[in-house]
Amino acid sequence: MKLVLDLLIGDAQSDRVVPPTGIAARLTVFVAGAMAFLAVLAVALTLTAARVADAWANELAQAATLRLPVGADDALVIAALNLLETTPGIASARVLSDAEQAALLAPWLGADIGLDELPVPRLIAIVAEDQGYDAAGLRARLTGEMPTAVLDDHGRWRAPLVQAASRVRLVGWFSFLLIVAAMAAMIVLAAHASLAAHAQVIRVLRLVGARDVYIARAFVRRFTLRTGLGAIGGVIIGLLALELLPDADTAGGFLANVGFEGAGWLWPLVIPLLAAIVGFVATRAAAMARLRDQT
């Protein structure tokens, strides 16, 4: 708590060591704002992509398809429906209409082709309950009662989506760490430049008895506040940029409402705080190292 108060209130005498304006000040604020802006976009895109992939995977996990052979009669369809309705874990099962099957084939064969021109199998859409069903047991039962039926539980589609969601998270958080590292590096360079520009002032302060901790405190406070304020501005601009993106309905499904939801809204609050912490640690390390070199 005392450290936070020292950073906010500061020392009027030690603050004179660091000029309130100059290239180092402007560079620090700009870098913090730019990196916070990129951090907001990186986190928003990461959370959104992972959220969409998880939603798709969950939808596929709840859905399955039973494929009956071409020309299956109504008796076979009714038997298949009865079998599915008596299977524990299955919420509903229904036969896809000709219009629905034509819509599924339209992206590949075009919208004008009729199903009577193709040997199309009969499809039954299955919706599972929350706890799911025993796919292996259902396949064994189908093999015994109607071996011509094929169950597709969408596992081959669900597994790549789950893997993609994991990789999206990994790449997104790695990008976030790179942004934080780049911010720290730029702040260190700015602090070194400011310390080098005031080498004569530092020597005079030492001659009158000022300790390195006292001198470094002024640099640490000023650069930490600049970093925090710049990050706040960058976060605000980043949130405004997200608001300007079209929603999923306007974009025709190309975009999926990129942004924060639920607990994800904590990130816009955490990013400026994290930036200030990075600024504090980076400036303190740079200041103490530079002061030791100037001894």
Image (spheres, rainbow, N blue to C red):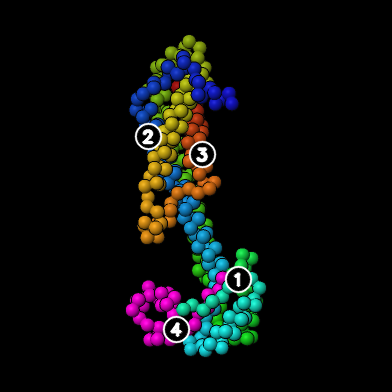
Residue in the image at 62% along x and 81% along y: 83
Amino acid type, label 2 = Phe
Membership of 104 in magenta stretch: yes
The answer, for residue 169, to whether it is visible in the render is yes
Classify mark 3: helix, strand or loop: helix
Which mark, residue 270? 3
**x, y percent for residue 127:** 56, 70
Q: Which residue is mark 2?
A: 30
* Tag in front: 1 or 4: 1
Give the residue at x 48% y 25%: 221
Give the amino acid type for the residue marked by disc 3 in the picture: Val
Separation of residues labelled 3 and 2 (CA atoms)? 19 Å
Nearer to me, 108 or 4:
108
**Horizontal and vertical percent for residue 212?**
51, 20
Answer with mark 3 or mark 4, whichever residue precedes in sequence. 4
Q: Is residue 215 above or below residue 152?
A: above
Q: Write the start and end of the magenta stretch as one range.
A: 98-127
Image side of residue 91 versus residue 226, left or right: right
Residue 136 visible here: no
Between residue 256 and residue 271, name the one nearer to us: 256
The answer to whether the residues at label 3 and label 1 have Cβ atoms under 8 Å apart is: no
Vertical placement of residue 255 versus 64, above or below: above
The disc placed on residue 120 is 4
Magenta segment: does it hold 57?
Answer: no
Q: CA distance from mark 1 to mark 4?
A: 26 Å
